[in-house]
Amino acid sequence: MRGLIALIGLLLLPFAAAAADLRMPVKAQPIVAPIPSWAGAYLGLHAGYTIASAEGDYTGVPPPPPMSFYTFDLKPSGAALGGQFGYNAQYGAWLFGVEGDLSWIVSGSDLIWDPAGSPRFDEIELFWTAHARGRIGYVAGGSMIYLAGGAAFAGVRATHQGPVGASSATWFDSRTLTGFSLGGGFETFFAPNWIFRAEYLYDRFGNERYDWAPDSRYSNSDLTLNTVRLGVIYRP
């Protein structure tokens, strides 16, 4: 009889062990979210505002007399709407990239009349800006701060109106300006493959001379831009 009981106990032992395993709670392994990568190509859209300053002066020498001279600081500022594309390489927490962008400037014009009261005025219109920049950034999880610098471009038109005899004439000169750009910003992932960006750009262009009439009427002006932009970027 004792042998029979021992045999039955041996046969039931695996089932008892299985029942004990069912009663013991199993701790779930934590799910580790993948760290987003910043490497690769990307493209996006941005919107912001450009505050411009075009400092310069107008000089008119006889004919017609008298000589005229006045200074100006025009503000052809406006909303900046456009897009950007680029490529990043990431080495640990450091990011290196290149980027190009183009912005249309909405209602970016300003003019000044001759303070002496003559029918003269000077106007500067800012139509678009573009950049070709390099970037270096520091990545911490799903966010990054960066500095950027490179070439800046701007499409402008200068206008001058002045007296000609008993009437007046208007001169126009459209140019593509080249200068330099410095800036920086912040980016963060808000969804897989989607990035939010906030950035600041400082652009400066050299002095431009506009000859309205050879050796008798001309204007000089430079152009400085301060831009704040927000953007959304898609990284495949």
Image: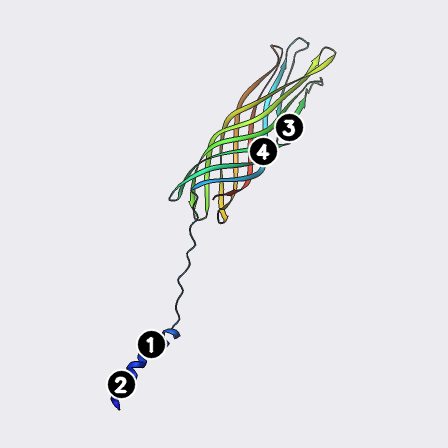
Mark 3 and mark 1 lie on one chain; the one further toward the N terminus is 1
Say which residue label 3 marks: 109
The tag on residue 6 is: 2
Q: How is the image coloured?
A: rainbow
Tag 2 near tag 1, CB within 8 Å:
no
Which residue appears at 27% of the width and 85% of the height?
6
Disc number lying in front (2 or 1): 2
Q: Amino acid at mark 3?
A: Ser
How far is the residue under mark 1 from the one under mark 4? 74 Å
Secondary structure under the numbered disc 2 in the rendered image: helix
Give how far across and how far down residue 112 sits, in percent: 67, 23
Identity, as a three-letter code, of the amino acid under mark 1: Ala
Marks 3 and 4 sit apart, C-alpha to C-alpha, by 12 Å
The reply, left or right, for residue 54 in relation to residue 20 is right
Q: Is residue 129 above or below residue 188?
A: above
Q: Are marks 4 and 2 in contact (CB under 8 Å)?
A: no
Q: Distance from label 2 to label 3 (Cα)?
A: 101 Å
Quadrant where the image shows the N terminus? bottom left
Q: Image height check: is 111 above or below 2?
A: above
Q: For the residue carrying disc 4, how many other residues have a C-alpha within 10 Å: few (<14), some (14-19), or many (20+)? A: many
Q: Position of residue 161 (x, y in %)?
A: 68, 18
Which residue lies under the disc numbered 1? 17
Q: Which residue is mark 4?
A: 50
Residue placed most toward the observer, 60 or 171: 171
The residue mark sitting in front, 4 or 2, is: 2
